[in-house]
Structure formats: C-alpha cells, structure tokens
Image: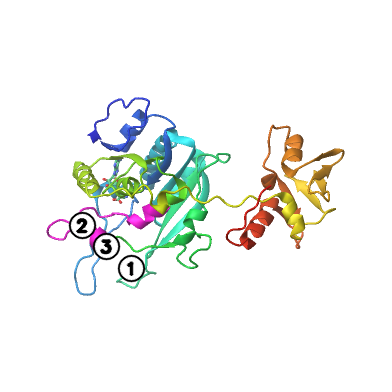
Amino acid sequence: MSGKNSHVGDCCPFNQVFLGDALDILPTLPEECVDLVFADPPYNLQLKEDLWRPNLTRVDAVDDGWDQFASFADYDAFTRAWLTGCRRLMKDSATIWVSGTYHNIFRVGTIMQDLGFWILNTVTWFKSNAMPNFNGTRLKNDVEFVIWAKKSPDSRYTFHHHRMKPFNDFSPGKQLGSVWKIQATGGAERLRDADGKKLHSTQKPEELLRRILLASSSPGDVVFDPFLGSGTTAAMSQHLRRQWFGIERDPAYVALIQERLEHVTPLPLDDPLLAEPPKPPRVAFRRLLEAGYLQAGDRLWFDQPDCEAVILPDGRLQAGDQVGSIHRLGAQLKGTPSCNGWMHWQYQDANGQFRPLDDLRQQYRAKLKPGDHERS
Ligand SMILES: C[S@@+](CC[C@H](N)C(=O)[O-])C[C@H]1O[C@@H](n2cnc3c(N)ncnc32)[C@H](O)[C@@H]1O
C-alpha cells in the first residue's frame, strides 16, 4: 500500500499511502485527478514551554518535531509549496478543505488567495470538550477553523446542500451553517497503545471528515490528503466509499494507517448516505409571478443596472425588441449559447438593494411542502 517517491503514471493511485515528504512527492503525482483535498497541515503551534494542569500533571500538548518551523517565513514557504502541489492535482471542479488554528490559519488563507483559490466558507469547529486554559491568562481555545475553497473563482464544484441539513447542530433539518459542534477525538475512536498513550497527537474526529466528504464529494470520487497522520481521511473515505490516496512521511504513522484501515467497514451500498442526494424541486420563473414575489411590468437588471428588462404577463422578459425566457434572453444579451438566468438577473428588494433572482427562487422553494413537485 505504501510507495516510494517513484513515477506514479497518469492515473490516480487509488487507496495508497505514499511514504515520504509531501514536497517531494506532490510533483510526481498525476495532474487534475482529484475531486476533494483535505489537508491538516502542521500548525506551527509555537508552544514555548510545557503546560501543566492544576493537579501538576503535564498536558499532552502537540510538541512534535514535524509541527515546528524556524520562522514564519519558513512556514509560509512550506505552505505555499504544498498548496501549489495540491492545486495541480485538483480537477477544475474540485474543492479543498484546510484546517488550522489562530496560529496559522490567517497565513494559510492569505496564501490560498494569492495562489488563486476562491474561498467558499470558513468552518469554525467548536470543540465542546476542549481543555481549559489552566493559567487563566486568555480565553479557552475551543475552536479550530477549516477553510473551504474551490480551485478558482469561476469553477463549478460539488456541494450537497440538502444532504447536509441533518448535520445542523443548532436547528436540525435547516440549512447547515459554518459553526460545527464536534467533540475533539476521544473515547474508543482515539487510537492508543497498550499503555493508553495516544498514537498520534492530532488525530482528527471522524465526524469532521464525515461532514466534509458528504458535503463536497460523491461515492466513487477521489479524495487526497497530503498529511495523512493517523489516516482519518483514508478511514472515512473507505467507510463512505470514496477512493483516496495521500502522503505521510513518518513510517510509524503509515503502519498505523494500514492497521486502522483493516478495521474500517464500508457502508452497505443501499445506505441512505450513499444515495444520490435529493435534488431541489425545479421552479419555473412564472411561479414567482403566481406567488406574488414579482409582477408583470416589474423590471429586472442583467448583471449590472444599466441593462434592464420588463417582465411580461406570460413570465417572459422584454429588453428593447428582444423577448425571451430569463435564460434565453440572458444568453442573447451575453452572446453565449446558454445562460443561467437565475444567477444573472437581479431584482430590487424593498430597500432598493439589487439581489440575484435566485434569492427569490430560494424563498419560494423554502415555502414548498414536502411532495410539492414543480415542473418548468
Ligand atoms: C496534523 S497531522 C495530520 C493528522 C491527521 N489529519 C489525522 O487525523 O490523524 C500532520 C501529519 O503530517 C505529517 N507531515 C508533516 N510534515 C510533512 C511533510 N512535509 N510531508 C509529509 N507528511 C508530513 C506529520 O508526520 C503528521 O502525521
């Protein structure tokens, strides 16, 4: 399962750990073959001294050599190099998730933007079981962040919006927000040796990876992790029937991953989590007129306010002597074969703000009852 830094060929190397330094291995991997990247890089935690609990036991902090860098400049150069390598592997439609804390996440985010990634969200992972700040010198550090980005501003990407609603920790069943309440890894999930010592200092919770994989990939998609550690990404990919591959430079961790994967059972093929996520009902533009969101005679603006059209009673638009559906007229105005009119036409809300027509479609959909089917 593990391989050396040899030529990998043009196909994605499925379900393999590459043993070695990510900076050496990334350039040898095939281009544009990955659907999703999860990266949990060294955080450069900068812990200056040991931490002690009030009962004088030492805190098992992350003080591993792999997490330490001589300077911010060194850390930035490392970050730029591995992010560049990952971007090369990503299909245009792929997205990347990168975890971090206040120590590194702002540097990582800046570098991602500089490299051309387009940030979609920052997930705040709230750890309800986080350790207190024993010295009482600052706030309890109970969050980590995960930046979610697409490859470039114009790329289309996978997001299973409806699939994620059950994971809303605050209003179950409603749209999932970007604060996720997940306990830090513990209990039976935490990998330990016979003496109870953690086998990896930063093992991520499976629930975090479950959400990330379900949100932005589909069964059979290819998931890549440049810093596999104890293999949480690989384990959850195997469980959720995604293909995966990744890199880890410590042979002991590679052995740990192999051992871990032997105990991971893929979900049964008929498990609802593997089913095609439900598609949102189609909405015809004229439904917005019937429901009173807009009226015949109202104006819409195309991309920018100096190009406008009037809504006709039958739900078509008229701009000058051109008449057509929101999509057809949009394509004519853009001079392109097709156009998603929901995204390009804007209406003016009660406060005079221009908003995409899609906002009204979302409001209309939110009021549909289960079983309501719309056809255009
Ligand atoms: C934060 S941990 C990842 C933990 C992982 N997400 C998990 O759930 O176990 C980062 C891992 O990257 C590895 N690592 C650090 N620098 C590396 C490099 N340059 N190339 C490959 N692996 C590296 C470390 O050995 C460590 O296991």
Residue holding disc 2: 198
Task: Report the number of numbered marks.
Answer: 3
- Mark 1 lies within 8 Å of ligand 1 (Cβ measured): no
* Left/right of residue 52 with respect to residue 356 in the rendered view: left
User: 315 or 132: nearer the eye?
Assistant: 315
Most extreme residue toward the left, as rendered? 194
SS for dot 1: loop
Q: Amino acid at mark 1?
A: Asn
For residue 193: magenta? yes
* Residue 166 place in picture, x, y as percent: 46, 61
Which image quadrant is residue 21 in?
Answer: top left
SS for dot 3: loop
Q: Are marks 3 and 1 in contact (CB under 8 Å)?
A: yes
Going from the N terminus, do you reach mark 1 or mark 2 first? 1
Q: CA distance from mark 3 to mark 2?
A: 10 Å
Q: Which residues are magenta?
A: 187-211
Residue holding disc 1: 129
Q: Main secondary structure of the magenta part?
A: loop
Going from the N terminus, do you reach mark 3 or mark 2 first? 3
Q: Amino acid at mark 2?
A: Lys
Q: Amino acid at mark 3?
A: Gly
Going from the N terminus, do you reach mark 3 or mark 1 first? 1
Q: CA distance from mark 1 to mark 2?
A: 17 Å
User: 169 or 111: nearer the eye?
Assistant: 169
In this rendering, the label closer to the viewer, 3 or 1: 3
Disc number for residue 147: none
* Left/right of residue 153 with respect to residue 192 in the rendered view: right
* Number of residues whose C-alpha sits closer than 10 Å to that of mark 1, classed few (under 14), some (14–19) or many (20 or more): few
SS for dot 2: loop
For residue 2: magenta? no
